[in-house]
Image (cartoon, rainbow, N blue to C red):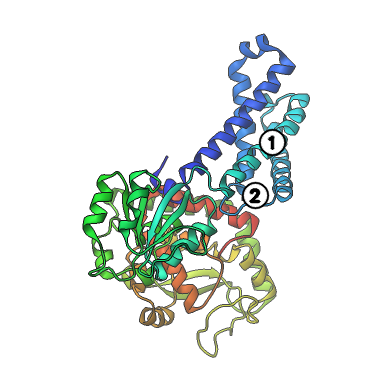
Amino acid sequence: MPYILHKYYPWRNIAFAIGEGLLIFLVINCINIYWSGVELFLADLAVYSLRSIIVTSMFQLCLYYFDLYDLSIIPNFADSITRILQAFGFGCIALALLYYLFPGIIISTKVFWSGFLIVCLTISLWRYIYFVILERRMFAQPIALVGSGALAASIVSAIEGKKDSGYKIVALVRRDGGAEDAHAVPVYADVRGLNELCSQRKVEKIVLALDERRGRLPMSDLIDYKFMGVEILDGVGFFEELTGTMPVERVTPSWLLFSGGFRVARLTNLYKRMLDVAVAAAGLIFSLPIFLLSALIIKLESPGPIFYCQERVGLHGKPFKVIKFRSMRADAEKDGPVWASTNDSRVTRFGEFIRKVRIDEIPQMINVLRGDMSFVGPRPERPVFVEQLAQVIPFYALRHVVKPGLTGWAQVYYPYGASEEDALRKLEYDLYYIKNLSITMDLFVIFQTVKIVLFRQGAR
């Protein structure tokens, strides 16, 4: 399993998805055996297995696209059942189309519908049990958190808000000490208080989340714990792995200098360029009818050009012209550039629609083919806003060390927003992407983007 997938999705969630797939596969095959008999099933084992794999893959794909593999938030049982039925209902429609195109993979009606009912019941029970495990944080790794500042508070909030993080805080270390805090875990004044927990393996990791470390790290005690088998982790790195973001306000230049990542091999750049060309060319070909129809409607709806070419900042800070379908009135910036906003009065009626379904972004695939942009990367910003943001947001210029993208890590995980605060939060995602850049990550972002475009959710 690719490392980047493990970094953002805990092993327990990967195991959950694999286990669920095996469960669906086994249920379908058990029903095949019930209706066909063991001898006939074994005689055509390969055919039955292929048909079961197709049904399993389709159902799991629908579960994914209905956000049922986002386990960070635990839904109530009734909501979970409803969404499972919706996903499987959509899966049945997709399978019907597939069976129409490829009749040889059809499974019998009685197997399909009895399988549908039993799979729904089995998956609902399976998920109920797993959600109980997540809610009670069973089998989660116990950690001790050292620190009481903003970074420590962010880590606590991230663990508590992400039920599938795979961690539980069993002890806190902070200078003011105390018997226990609001989270019902013991609090110690220094790390020596963790000795008993560490020696008994009730603490498996110690996370150092100190906002200021100079002269405050008890090195000898931490070394002792390390040789007991306890992992000692840097708070910034732990937060990065936990959330898929880099906490820009907590990062120092020395941390950036000595941290891993931020290195893209020449071969990776070559593969990335090949992926860009392939995806952009395919995207333009498949979207050609929508492209032509949109161009016609824009021309008929309001006076002005079909395309909107705007200067943006690209690789190494070099400006380029980004191409989009015009979604605003031709005189939208007669008073100067301003941040785009939700329900912007300058947006035309059709412009509002193409923004919602991301059609306005289709011409940017031309930028990708020209090499101005990559398919995945930080979204390009206008020079006037870059200059403004670079003065108030630390490390903002680092987002220009890679090509800007049509979609990106921030776009699939951060909701739409256009302000300095939103720019800071998006930079945290962008720097995480730049640090961990890989072809696997690009494919994952493209896969997520397809879900967002089809179901009109997530960021822009």
- From the viewer's perspective, tell me whether residue 374 is left or right of residue 295: left
How far, Cα to Cα, is label 2 from label 1? 16 Å
Q: Nearer the viewer, mark 2 or mark 1?
A: 2
Q: Which amino acid does label 2 sit on?
A: Phe
**Which x, y percent locates residue 378?**
43, 65
- What residue is at 58 percent from the left and 34 percent from the top? 21
- What residue is at 71 percent from the left and 47 percent from the top? 77
- From the viewer's perspective, tell me whether residue 336 is left or right of residue 119: left
Q: Nearer the viewer, residue 409 or 326?
A: 409
On-image quarter of the C terminus? bottom right
On-image quarter of the N terminus? top left
- From the viewer's perspective, tell me whether residue 335 is left or right of residue 112: left
**Which x, y percent locates residue 211?**
34, 70
- From the viewer's perspective, tell me whether residue 433 is left or right of residue 227: right
Q: Which of 143 and 341 is in front in this view?
A: 143
Which structural element holds mark 1? helix
Q: Nearer the viewer, residue 23 or 330?
A: 23
Residue 372 seen in render = no
Query: How many neighbours does mark 1 have within 10 angstroms: few (below 14), some (14-19), or many (20 or more)?
Result: some
Residue at the spot of label 2: 66
Which of the labelled discs sits on residue 95, or is there none? 1
Using the image, determine if residue 293 lies above or below residue 333. above
**Which x, y percent locates residue 131?**
61, 45
Which of the labelled discs sits on residue 337, or is there none? none
Q: Which of 156 and 286 is in front in this view?
A: 156
Residue 103 seen in render = yes
Quadrant in which residue 228 is drawn? top left
Using the image, determine if residue 300 lies above or below residue 374. below
Quadrant in which residue 35 is drawn? top right
